[in-house]
Amino acid sequence: MPRTFEQFVKERQYITNVSESTVRWYWCSWKAWTKYQPDFIINARQAGVSAATLNCYLRALNGYFRWAGLPVLPKLKQAGKVIATYAETDIQKIMKGTCKGRAKTLCLLLVDTGMRIDEALSIQVKDIDFDNLLIRVMGKGSKERIIPFSFELRKVLWRFKGEKTGLLFQTRDGRKVKHRSIMRDVKDFLLRIGAKVPERMLHAFRHTFALNYLRRGGSVFHLQKILGHSTLDMTRRYVQLTTDDLVKVHQGYPCYRSSVKIGMKLTYVYPAWDVANFSATSWASSITLPYLSFFGLFFGLKTSSAFESFLRRSNAI
């Protein structure tokens, strides 16, 4: 007797212990498989299904084909798109915006922690450690992890929590909020405050968090743990985007010479590769001229007359 797709799903559900979301994904992929027969890939592409969506279907279908001893289908080549993120001005609008409901709190939670939307909607009030600034979430594959959050977010969550018990984000009868309802609330809030709504509106908060974490010198391995990625493959997408940012910054400045300006006076010019030759024996001695120039080069540092005097007394100039 041929092994059916229903048998495959039940085995994955009861033996492998996949989540309900994974089960829905399996059946959604199978529905697409039956819809676009007999030439699945060709018919789906002609119907306007993107390569990324088809590859998503194929991951589920190929899992069944391997289980049933059938030949698998090759994945399609898909274009590498720039990950959508929120601009810094839009984040400031969100922080300053007013909202009586849950939309603003959810936006700040997502951009401050980088968690997935389903993880955020599943948070229980008891999972939030306000003393140690930690949130316990249940991620994909029923993998639990602990995520840190900021002092500013603690204020927002404490006010929003009030006397609630159970779910942090809940309906009037205490049930979990549906994705469609929260997407409508967040989109209305963003449009009302004049923020640009990017593609994949809710997931873009996660991308924004990851990108800014790396821009500020965060470790890729720490980011992997915070985001709940099982491998670095997904995290590398953010690393590549940060590399592009550094290239743009580098192209905006001459790479062969750097300088420090104090007021309008040019005090010293040296090869840019000397930047790496500074030593740090103490805080005062570590503020050498190359060290100062490095930060001046990338962050537009300008020294005041008082700071110049301090540097001269410390033999930095």
Image: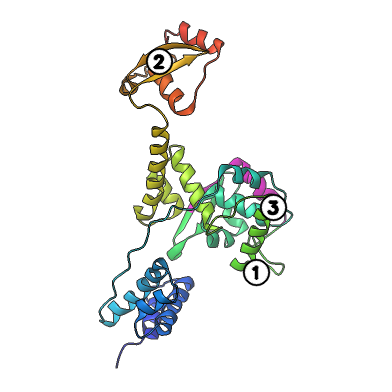
Q: CA distance from mark 3 to mark 2?
A: 49 Å
Q: CA distance from mark 1 to mark 2?
A: 60 Å
Horizontal side of residue 28 vs 179, given as left or right: left
Question: Is residue 178 visible to us here?
Answer: no
Select label 3 or label 2 by which is in front: 2
Quarter holding residue 49:
bottom left
Percent across and percent down for residue 3 are 32, 87
Going from N to C along the chain, the mark reached first, 3 or 2, is 3
**Bounds of the magenta segment:** 146-163
Q: Compared to 282, does 28 lie above or below?
A: below
Q: Which of the image's four quarters has the N terminus?
A: bottom left
Percent across and percent down for residue 171 are 68, 66
Of 2 and 95, the residue lying toward us = 95
| Residue that mark 2 sits on | 289
Q: Is residue 36 magenta?
A: no
Of 71 and 177, the residue lying toward us = 71
| Residue that mark 3 sits on | 160
Percent across and percent down for residue 55 are 37, 69
Q: Main secondary structure of the magenta part?
A: helix
Task: Name the outermost residue toward the front.
Answer: 46
Amino acid found under the numbered disc labelled 3: Phe
Q: Which of the image's four quarters has the C terminus?
A: top left
Q: Compared to 24, does 291 lie above or below?
A: above
Task: Name the outermost residue toward the bottom.
Answer: 1
Amino acid found under the numbered disc labelled 2: Leu
Task: State if disc 2 and disc 1 touch (CB < 8 Å).
Answer: no
Q: Secondary structure at mark 2?
A: helix
Identity of the residue drawn at 66% across and 56% down: 103
Q: Secondary structure at mark 3?
A: helix
Q: Secondary structure at mark 1?
A: loop
State how many labels appear.
3
| Residue that mark 1 sits on | 175
